[in-house]
């Protein structure tokens, strides 16, 4: 970023405002503003974090749920208000902050979301031990307006290019600032998230065998979430790769993520259709909650597999429907 500021500085006119949007360690914006003051004192810098969801970037740009601007003076704020005038006219909340607070908003939001996801996955572990049902638990606590139901779907955890990276970078930066203890809880959030993947692998071994070399496993889902082709730090692919490394024959299907997944993990086998993926499978893993997977007919799929066994890693399938079709059905956090 320092190189970028240095590169654009000679081209900045009097009164120009440089606006950063990336998720950065707190303190970056102030450092860049000081750099800019040295090489282009006629310009200023502000920070305007983006809150774009993958697959919804245009919608989130045109109709954001809030606008946060980190500025050092009224002039910089007014420039940004002028830029966002059409969006502000829709009633979008406007939050003025200082530079470090604006930087912290994005990582704090992502850390909170990660915490909520790992919390319900921790509850899934407890439900399994106690004979409870995490889907009912999540529904019950979700009605509490202080909690809400979003991000309370237990499963194999979060991935992608933001949440895992952001919480680890946040912890590292807090330690640099002398506030290590404040974010120690995020280490457990990260650990719970990674443990969810291992729990699925444990269920696979329990359902099949410790030795997986004689088994074929169909994996439905390669992306880290539906409606995206992003396979970065995908829990689904991580599980598939670990099972492949353990000797299983693993076949992966995904509506949009096959090519990105193939480039990242060329040793895996990929199928262009669900039918080809599950054909002859000893076990199906449902690991990304695509709509087309939720719409599968278990009676039809049952005619293609070797054994009617499925693990729902996203708690998104209709358990009663699959069991009524003769399937052995396992979902994380739900007692059998």
Image (spheres, helix red, strand yellow):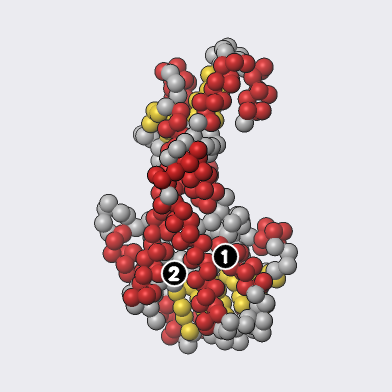
Identified at 49% across, 48% down, the residue is 167
Question: Which numbered disc, 1 or 2, marks the residue closer to the eye?
Answer: 1
Identified at 39% across, 55% down, the residue is 116
Which disc number belongs to residue 279?
none
Quadrant location of the N terminus in the rendered image:
top right
- Residue 75: give x, y in percent of width and height: 45, 17
Count the labels in the image.
2
Neighbours of disc 2 within 10 Å: few (<14), some (14-19), many (20+): many
The answer to whether residue 226 of the structure is visible from this angle is: no
Residue 109 is left or right of residue 218, and the answer is: left
Identified at 34% across, 64% down, the residue is 138
- Residue 71: give x, y in percent of width and height: 45, 24
The answer to whether residue 115 of the structure is visible from this angle is: yes
Which disc number belongs to residue 315?
2
Residue that label 1 marks: 236
- Viewer-closest of 125 and 254: 125
């Amino acid at each position: 970023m320092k190189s970028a500021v240095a590169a654009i500085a000679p081209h900045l006119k009097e009164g120009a405002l440089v606006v950063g949007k990336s998720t950065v360690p707190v303190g970056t914006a102030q450092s860049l503003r000081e750099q800019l003051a040295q090489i282009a004192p006629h310009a200023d810098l502000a920070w305007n974090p983006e809150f774009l969801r993958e697959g919804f970037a245009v919608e989130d740009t045109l109709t954001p749920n809030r606008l946060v601007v980190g500025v050092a003076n009224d002039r910089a704020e007014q420039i940004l208000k002028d830029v966002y005038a059409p969006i502000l006219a829709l009633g979008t909340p406007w939050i003025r902050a200082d530079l470090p607070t604006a930087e912290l908003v994005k990582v704090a939001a992502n850390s909170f979301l990660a915490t909520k996801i790992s919390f319900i996955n921790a509850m899934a572990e407890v439900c399994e031990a106690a004979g409870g049902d995490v889907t009912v638990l999540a529904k019950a606590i979700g009605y509490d307006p202080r909690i809400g139901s979003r991000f309370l779907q237990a499963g194999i955890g979060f991935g992608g290019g933001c949440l895992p990276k952001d919480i680890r970078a946040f912890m590292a930066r807090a330690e640099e600032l002398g506030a290590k203890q404040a974010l120690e809880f995020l280490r457990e959030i990260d650990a719970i998230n990674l443990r969810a993947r291992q729990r699925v692998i444990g269920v696979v071994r329990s359902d099949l065998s410790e030795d997986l070399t004689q088994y074929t496993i169909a994996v439905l889902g390669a992306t880290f979430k539906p409606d995206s082709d992003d396979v970065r730090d995908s829990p689904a692919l991580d599980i598939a790769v670990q099972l492949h490394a353990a000797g299983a024959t693993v076949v992966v299907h995904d509506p949009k993520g096959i090519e990105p997944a193939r480039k990242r993990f060329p040793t895996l086998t990929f199928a262009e259709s669900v039918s080809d993926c599950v054909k002859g499978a000893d076990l199906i893993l449902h690991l990304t909650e695509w709509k087309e997977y939720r719409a599968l007919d278990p009676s039809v799929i049952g005619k293609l597999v070797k054994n009617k066994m499925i693990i729902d890693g996203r708690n998104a399938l209709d358990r009663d429907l699959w069991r009524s079709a003769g399937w052995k059905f396992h979902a994380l956090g739900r007692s059998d």
